[in-house]
Image (cartoon, grey):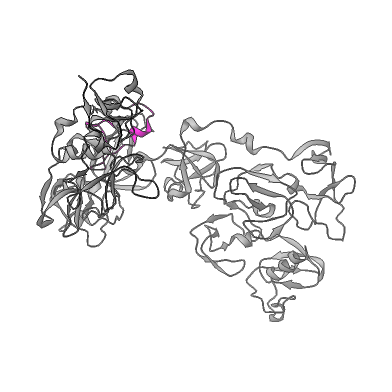
Amino acid sequence: MDMEMESQNLEHIHPLVFNEEQSNETKKAKCSRCGEVVSDPSFSCGECEFSLHKKCAEAPSKIDHPYHHHHPLVLLPESPYVGSCYCDFCYKKCDFFVYHCSCGLDFHIKCALFTLSIAEQKLQELNHIATKDPSVFLEEGNKELENAKCFGCWLPLGESRYFSVACGFNLHIKCAELPHEINHPFHKEHPLVLQFNIKRFSCKICGETRPRGFLYCCSACSFALHIKCAQQPTKINHLSHRRHPLVLQLNSGNLLSKTCQETQHEKFVYCCSTCNFSLHTECAFLPPIVKDKNHQHPFTLFQGQPSFVCNACGLEGNYIAYICSTCNLMIHTKCISIPLIIGVRRHYHPIYHNYFISENESKIRDCSFCDVEVNIDYGSYYCLRCNFIAHVKCATKYRDRYYIIEAKDIAGNHDDDLGVNPITCVIEQNESGEMTRIKHFSHAHDLILSDNVVENDITCDGCMLLILDSFYCCTLQCNFFLHKVCAKSPRKKHLWFHGCQELHILVVGYLFKCSICEYDCGGFSYKCNKFNVHICLQCSVIDYRTKHPGHQHPILYNRNQHGRCNGCGETWRSQFSCKHCDFNLDFDCSRLPLTTRHKRHEHPLALAYHEGNDYPKYHYCDLCEKERDPNLWFYHCAICEFSAHPNCVLAIYIDKG
């Protein structure tokens, strides 16, 4: 039966017709209040394209919402803000009518009415909203469902029944049935009322602050508890500590949890004061079985083991572990979710997590981050192509310095990208196989190998440093010169010290400022197209693990190495360091040229690492005439006993160039 409805209150000039069943027109129409396709009984205008869901048409102009009893929610025809407006329930954009409170609370019409039905315990009105069992309906590869959490308790939807995400709601059925008011032993003065978390209260038990969701709250005392925390028992018996019950109490001294061995800033912990035994609230309630996509078998909770070594990361654990009896693995709780493949700045290829590595696979055993030997009998990250190996803890210590890679996203051969040869053609070779005549991508004419180092300064067109050894030069004598090593610089290269993981492209013909040494340069450079920066050839050749002539052992770059540089004597926070002895070298000193020239001296100057002459008169710089520290590096001419600070030699040299 059709009926007409007065439309003055609906801000429409024509009468509206009630449609009990959908027609072909209403199937395509969108509701003018909520913006969704009309699917329920609705009102429509016969003279223009105007439609309303019946529920949207009947939506009250104000709602006194039990979850926000301080002020009414007022229905507005558009966003009350200059910018975008987002629903505080489903967090989707509000482009049409919105229920608004001056507290900053905003809801779609359907979200406001949905939560009102829950607050008033009218769940029978929600029968039209489907519920799903994630264990049955969770589609493989559907990340939106995999990551979905309940709006009320902020726990994963898991295997509990919940209101369908297809309708824009993520809410456990059990959270929809929560009592509106509770009494809690930690706040005996007043009852706690279920509220929207509009004031961004932090939970008094876990200490965390969430921007949205439900809270049990006493607004007068600013006391709030998350749903999950409010439901936690205040006393438990735990298998990890059978002697006495554990009592939920204030964490007065940031106690170390016996299971995860970490100090978390939780306000409350489960504790036995007699035995000085404590557990974080998260550690106290672990699921008995955990499935992870990176392991083919489920992990089972194992409690009571005093100590063990985690097969996933190689570090010690206590009391609580997860085991896979099929694979004979015992691992930390947090190691269940270790990513299988990650990318790190220090290495171009993806690195894979392995539970063990056979001896014939690994040639290098020292971690590429901390330089301490990796026990290959336990888990590590490894690259078979390059013998790159790292402790799990070192590779994943800083979340902004690694990224997770999905197996399906790995395609192509990275070695092919790195192997772009700058020498486009080898024309002639000598008997020992050395290239004596080549074509190079950077120059139009052939280049020939020459050992004729003349006394006049010759500068390499690649790195802009002096040429003091054999080099390539142009056959037509157009003053183009390259060191042998510069001629072999790859066309594409991964630079470990640069923030992005993109390959840098070798470019020529630019005047640029190197983003590392900040010198103005005019030779070859590696360009990052993502950030539009250039890095000079001299800076690009420094590897994170290197062997410098100034020290007898290999040195490794360590971001956390704080100390005095043996080259310049300055104190730095990030340096190359030696694990065998107390030797540090900052990045600038590591790139000092081993040999150079100066316009005020006729002979080449070699980099010297210690003063062989103890006579004090030699401990002066022959350029600035100030005293030198004999234990620091300097440039020296053995023919004339000429010595100078590196900065004095290179600064004037650079100005000259």
Decide whether residue 141 is among the magenta residues. Answer: yes
Location of residue 131 with respect to 589 vertically, above or below: above
Q: Position of residue 628 (x, y in %)?
A: 66, 76
Q: Position of residue 165 (x, y in %)?
A: 29, 32
* Quadrant of the drawing holding the N terminus: top left
Judging depth in this view, the residue of 46 and 113 nearest the camera is: 46
Q: Position of residue 620 (x, y in %)?
A: 70, 78
Provide the major secondary structure of the magenta segment.
loop
Q: Position of residue 286 (x, y in %)?
A: 24, 41
Residue 591 shows up from this direction: yes
Q: Residue at x 62, y 54 (%)?
A: 547
Judging depth in this view, the residue of 528 and 54 nearest the camera is: 54
Question: Is 69 placed left or right of 537 in the picture?
Answer: left
Judging depth in this view, the residue of 293 and 219 nearest the camera is: 219
Decide whether residue 393 is among the magenta residues. Answer: no
Question: Is 523 placed left or right of 8 in the picture?
Answer: right
Q: Residue at x 68, y 37 (%)?
A: 420
Judging depth in this view, the residue of 153 and 261 nearest the camera is: 153
* Quadrant of the drawing holding the C terminus: bottom right
- Report the span colored magenta: 139-164
Question: Is 507 placed left or right of 65 in the picture?
Answer: right
Q: Residue at x 79, y 38 (%)?
A: 433
Which image quadrant for residue 112?
Answer: top left
Residue 110 shows up from this direction: no
Which image quadrant for residue 314?
Answer: top left
Location of residue 2 with respect to 158 vertically, above or below: above
